[in-house]
Structures are given as structure tokens and as C-alpha cells.
Amino acid sequence: MVRTPKLAAERDAGRFLFPTFGTTIASEAPIQGPDSINVANTNAIEHAGRVLALWEGGSAFALDPNDLATRGPVTWKEGFEQVPFSAHPKLDRHGHLWNIGTFADKLVVWHIDAAGKLASVQTGESPYPNGMAHDVAITERYIVLPLPPIKLNFAAIARGATPEQAFVFERGQPLRILVMKKDDITERRVFELPAQMVFHVGNAYERRDGNIALSFVASADDEFLVHGAVGLVAGQADNGTGASLQSTVLDMRSGRASSEAISGAIEFPRIDPRRIGTPARFLAAAASWKRYPRRGSTLFHGVALRDLQTGNVDRYDYGEHVAVEEHIVVPKPGASGERDAWLVGTTFDARRKVTLVNVIDARAVDAGPVAQAALPYWLPLGFHGNFSAA
């Protein structure tokens, strides 16, 4: 749907020309920067009159929200063409987007105002050069960026390397949490935790004592990145990601970090979007808690809503034959409570061979969907999304 240069070139040629994650293809055309291989397939968000289709390492692609026609790559500032605008921007309560991008030893922090214009772009050194930075959190004053000990081999990636060749998990290195002032990223502090893999953050906020509370989902190694994700595409079962929610406190005075794992296999954490960067009590996620004998895969089978204050969890099991994807939190119109919301997400029903869009009342998660929309075909499994009212 997103008419990237990669898609256009390969359609014209009638064959694949460029490598991509998990797919080894000998490049048959010159790679002229990140957007030559940009697939714009990881996230989408509507902001300031356009839909931004996002990828890990290149430009955001703008789409018309009325018909999803591709307008083209976004250049926020002259001289910053194709500089990565990553897949997980955070929208603050003022309607501003904050995002990061990384390349080699550089780190970029983007600030886009509510009108969709560049408010500022700052470039600095990464404390972990050539590392993978996938998701970012914000608070009122800070950018909070997890940097797991994963090195990227860019030359191997350009050659269409397997994930095992493209990524190196450095077990002797810590998980770094980089905290930077929004208005001056040179004012920064690096916190260290034991080595672990992090894809997604839940939230961050500044506590009354001046410390930062951060939640993220982590696993002990890179098994899912280098084997599990590609194996799923190939139709192979895997042994599980072992990913769980981590509740972390960053002590801004001492520079020390403490973290506690919260039991339960989850991914794709989401909170009330109105509370990003401020305290949020409830966190929704795709979840697994059963071992179905014939399932043969660790794709999530349910959705869970966790009360971060009490530890209580409300959950719904879609069943043995269903793969559960990200469920986002959509506040009900005119309501202010965190549970006055819908959980909206997609599932794939392997028995019926259909993709479903599900709507669950956040106050009655265990009752399951109050509405479902079924497509007459199935879609490829996806990653992330956001809600826009029609």
C-alpha cells in the first residue's frame, strides 16, 4: 500500500531486487541510501493531516488520510534527507511528536510540532555505536532510550544477511538506558542494567522524588530476533521469547537503576495514549499463559490488561487456533478514566483462515470482544498501529 522506491523498482522489474530483514536477496540494483530498502511497514500514525508510515532505518512516508495514496518520503529539514525517523514516535499531550533515529555512532532526536512542522532536530553521539535502538519513551522533560547490547552489521545487512549474521548480541555488555534532556540532548545520563533484549517500552514518567519510572518488555537474549521472528515467517515453531514486563526506577541523583520483572509472557505494551509521559495505571498487551498441546507456536493467544498499582490482571483467551497481535487503547469519547476505553486489535484465526478486527471493553476484558469485523481473506501478521476517528 505504501509506494516506496523499493516497491516501485521491484514492480517495474517484476522481481525482488533488494534484501530485507530475514530474506536473503542478492542486490541487483544500487542501494542509494536507506530509502532504497525502506519498506515503511512497522507502524503508522495520523498526525497533522497526513498518515506517516514508519520503518526502523529511513524516512517516514506520508500518505493521504482520505484514500491512503502515497505522497512520498518526508524530509523534515534540508540536509537531513533519509536520516532515520524511527518507527515508534511518541505523541505528547500537546500534540507534538518526539522520535529518534540512529545511524553508525550518531543519534538524532526529532521534535515535530502539532502542525506537523519541524520544531527542532538535535544530533549527538550514541553511547553504544552501531547498536539497535527500536523504541523510545518520553517524560515531560526527558527522552528515555533503551539501548540493548545488540550490534548491527550494516555491511552484512546490505548483502541480505541472515539475522544471525546481521545482529550480534554482546552478552558482556549491559542494557543501557540513555536519558537526555528534551531541549538539550547533551545533558544526558546513561544507566546500566544486566544484558537483555528490549524491543518495546510501556511508558515513562517523572516521579515526585525526581526519579524516572520506566516500564519496558525484555527478554534474556536475542533468540526471538535472530531465530523466532524469521522462523514464524517460514512457518516454523519456536520455543518462546520469554519476554516479560520490567518495572524500572532510574535514580537521577546516584545514576543507578533498579529493575523488577513482573511475571507473565507479554509483548506489544500499550497505555492510554493521553497519558504518554505521565503516570498511567493500566497497561494492555498481547499475552500467553497457556500451553496448548497442538499449537506448536508461541504466538500470543490472548490479551491482558494489567493494573500496575495492584498487580491484578484481567485477560481474555482467544483460543488455541488464534494468533493475537497488538491491541491498542482507544479512549471512549468524552470519558477520562483509563478503563473507559476500548481495546482494539487484530487476530488471525487459523481454523477459519480469516483476519479479525476485535473490540473489547477495557472494563470487561474477560468477556471478550463486544464486536468483531471479519475480512473475507487473511492478512500477513503485522506489527503496530494507532487509532484515528473516521
Image (cartoon, grey):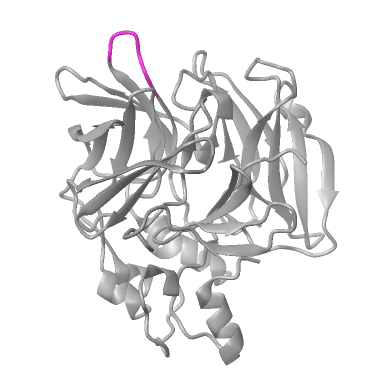
Q: Would you place residue 215 above or below residue 209 in this image?
A: below
Give the residues in magenta: 205-210
The picture places residue 109, in percent across and down from the top left corner, at 32, 43
Q: Would you place residue 173 above or below residue 14 in this image?
A: above
Report the residue at 70% width, 20% height from top: 340
In the picture, residue 137 is in which quadrant?
Answer: top left
Q: Would you place residue 205 above or below residue 297 in this image?
A: above
The picture places residue 240, in percent across and down from the top left corner, at 47, 52
Viewer-nearest residue: 169 or 39: 39
Q: Residue furthest top?
A: 208
Left-right relation of 83 to 271: left
The picture places residue 381, in percent across and down from the top left corner, at 63, 59
Most common secondary structure along the magenta stretch: loop
The picture places residue 188, in percent across and down from the top left corner, at 19, 32
> Which quarter of the image is occupied by the N terminus?
bottom right
Q: Is residue 16 magenta?
A: no
Report the residue at 49% width, 27% height from top: 276
Report the residue at 15% width, 49% height from top: 172
